[in-house]
Amino acid sequence: MKRLSLPRLAGATTTRPVAMAALLAGAALLAGCVLPPTNAPGLMDVAERPAEKALLAGMRAYDDAQYPTAELQLVQALKQGLASPRDRAAAHKHLAFIYCTSNRAKACEDEFRAALVDDPGFALTKSEAGHPQWGPVYQRVKQ
């Protein structure tokens, strides 16, 4: 098996271990360039914002089948200005579910449209899209 050797500069007396150490140190310095910014907000920072707090409360109320409370919280979250397009789409989606199940088809359709405006990549899961009440409304909006 042939041994590879590092190229030497003219007049250089560097030994292999020193060259390897220098190479590793350079790689470590470059790796430091890909660290995430230290000023990025954490979950606790985001969860304390009024709009995001209202979104979490609305989704919790929805999961607990407290639909009137969920509706109020989700509307409040949107009014307070959710920062993330995905969060706005999630609020609109849950409002659409509430409106469809309470026979407010036009409001349901409007919420699905708003979700798609806020997040063009918005899509229901397969089981959500197959729901008998809001599935057909969503399919109409997607066309």
Image (cartoon, helix red, strand yellow):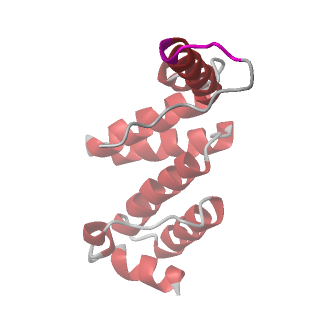
Which stretch did the figure color magenta?
12-17
| 19 sits left or right of 133 in the view | right
Residue 58 point in image, percent of width and height: 43, 39
143 is higher (above) or lower (below) than 25? below
| 102 sits left or right of 110 in the view | left
Name the residue: 40% across, 46% down: 68
Q: Can you tell which quarter of the image residue 7 is in? A: top right
**Which of these two is toward me, 6 or 141?**
6
Q: Quadrant of the N terminus?
A: top left
133 is higher (above) or lower (below) than 33? below
**Which of these two is toward me, 93 or 121?**
121
Name the residue: 56% across, 62% down: 115
Residue furthest to the right: 10
Q: Can you tell which quarter of the image residue 136 is in? A: bottom left
Q: Is residue 15 magenta?
A: yes
**Which of these two is toward me, 99 or 9?**
9
| 52 sits left or right of 62 in the view | right
Residue 45 point in image, percent of width and height: 56, 19
Residue 132 point in image, percent of width and height: 26, 77
Residue 66 point in image, percent of width and height: 31, 42
Which secondary structure type mostly characterizes the magenta part of the structure? loop
Q: Can you tell which quarter of the image residue 125 is in? A: bottom left
